[in-house]
Image (cartoon, grey):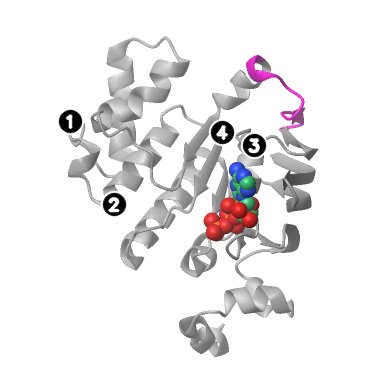
Amino acid sequence: MIETINIHKTFGENKVLQGINAQLKPGMNNLIIGGSGSGKTTLLKCIVGLHEPTEGEVLYDGQNFTNMDFVERVPIRKQIGMLFQSSALFDSMTVEDNIIFPLNLFTKMPRSEKIDRANFCLERVNLAGKNKLYPSELSGGMKKRVGIARAISMQPKYLFVDEPNSGLDPKTSILIDELIAEITQEYQTTTVVVTHDMNSVMGIGDHIIFLNEGKKWWEGSNKEIAHTDNPELNSFVFASKFMQAAREKL
Ligand SMILES: Nc1ncnc2c1ncn2[C@@H]1O[C@H](COP(=O)(O)OP(=O)(O)OP(=O)(O)O)[C@@H](O)[C@H]1O
């Protein structure tokens, strides 16, 4: 389990996060949602150590990550898989080399074992045999899947995904969400997804944290989210005409 304890993050005068207390649970899709600028990505970056919180602590299975130095963090970093917004693949590397990149960085595995692992991960995301393609030869959805394959190459305990559906059509978005949910279930990862996609919220939101103005405004599941009387949450959830129309049926 990951816990954030009283996380604050300030940039200059801008108090972006104001005391976030949250628990992110293993085997669950933990979704961080909220409007643009509410602090979702900042919170994710504080959790993985890309930002240092101004105040507060992040615990990984009870270990205080925030207080650790770079070297002390390495064993936890090795257990983290990440997929950030643009898939962040290296354009000059093949799909296979992209996937084994973390293995080159963190392990001394023989190359043959790394290739076996890459093949396994590619198969898992339904891209078997695409090893020698370059990112420029892939569609947006395929790039995301390669990003997921790379994120799971180290068999992570913690999986972080920022806006998995950005730039994808609704059908491909659902496939990516389902893939993330399956991986969470299979490997019992503590999965944390930042999104403002209501399809994802309704589809895979086991545990949802709604941020508003840098504060945790609401917490619950996708079964509960449509039935709250929290005005800010309701205006986020029912912002689209489609969700307004579906409201009666929820
Ligand atoms: N490195 C930074 N330096 C200064 N300000 C920053 C930095 N990163 C984020 N911010 C500010 O923090 C606020 C929250 O940004 P953040 O990216 O966390 O929001 P978000 O909820 O993820 O938004 P979106 O849905 O639009 O991606 C914004 O006002 C942004 O300008």
Q: Is residue 111 left or right of residue 36?
A: left
In the rendered image, residue 101, in percent from the top left (x then y), is placed at 37, 24
Residue 31 appears anywhere in the view: no
- Residue range in magenta is 61-71
The alpha-carbon separation of the residues under discs 2 and 4 comes to 26 Å
Amino acid type indicated by mark 1? Lys
Residue labelled with disc 2: 140
Q: Nearer the viewer, mark 3 or mark 4?
A: 3
**Res. 186 in view:** yes
Q: Which residue is mark 1?
A: 132
Mark 4 within 8 Å of ligand 1, using the beta carbon: no
Q: Earlier in the sequence, mark 3 or mark 4?
A: 3
Q: List the residue tagged with mark 4.
A: 157
SS of the residue under disc 3: loop
Neighbour tally class for label 3: few under 14, some 14-19, many 20 plus, Cα within 10 Å: few
Q: Circles 3 and 4: CB distance less than 8 Å?
A: no
In the picture of the structure, the residue carrying the numbered disc 3 is 51
Ligand 1 within 8 Å of disc 3? The answer is yes
Residue at 43% across / 35% down in the picture?
Answer: 151
Closer to us: 167 or 11: 11
